[in-house]
Image (cartoon, grey):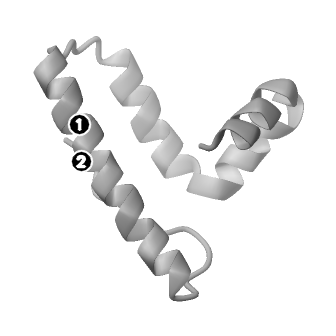
Amino acid sequence: MCFSCHSWFEENPADSGQWLINEIGEGAIQILREKRDSGIKVTKLEEKDIAKHYRAQLKAIEAERDTGVTGYIEFVSYQ
């Protein structure tokens, strides 16, 4: 999320939940909750690998957007 979207998200808690559901879907939210609650710790090296993976995923999504793709775009989760 960019800074302005993140700011809006935090400033509008009543609307942000529905926005998130519309943006990524209920299934993706459930996966994120499961990962959050798993309690798995990662090393600094793993954090770098995870960040690299999601940066690559973001570039792929941005490339699809540039070609006119709209709506939800699937991405590959790190795990």
In the rendered view of the protein, which quadrant contains the C terminus? top left
Question: In the rendered view, would you say 63 is above or below 8?
Answer: below
SS at mark 2 in the image: helix
Q: Which residue is depicted at the point 28% across and 11% down?
A: 39
Q: Which residue is mark 2?
A: 53
Mark 1 crowd level (few <14, some 14–19, many ≥20, 10 Å Cα) = some
Q: Quadrant of residue 68?
A: bottom right
Asked if residue 61 lies left or right of residue 44, the reply is: right
Question: In the rendered view, would you say 39 is above or below 9?
Answer: above
Q: Position of residue 43 (x, y in %)?
A: 14, 15
> What amino acid does circle 2 point to?
His
Which dot marks residue 67? none
Q: Are marks 2 and 1 in contact (CB under 8 Å)?
A: yes
Q: Position of residue 69 (x, y in %)?
A: 55, 83
Asked if residue 6 lies left or right of residue 37, the reply is: right
> What amino acid does circle 1 point to?
Ile
Asked if residue 29 lies left or right of residue 56, the reply is: right
Depth check: give the residue in front, 45 or 18: 45
Q: Which residue is depicted at the point 52% across and 41% down?
A: 29
Q: Which residue is depicted at the point 32% across and 47% down?
A: 54
Depth check: give the residue in front, 45 or 42: 45
Q: Is residue 77 visible?
A: yes
Mark 2 crowd level (few <14, some 14–19, many ≥20, 10 Å Cα) = some
Q: Which residue is mark 1?
A: 50
Q: Which residue is depicted at the point 85% across and 26% down?
A: 11
Label 2 to label 1, Cα distance in Å? 5 Å
SS at mark 1 in the image: helix
Question: In the rendered view, would you say 39 is above or below 53?
Answer: above
The residue sitting at the bottom extreme is: 67
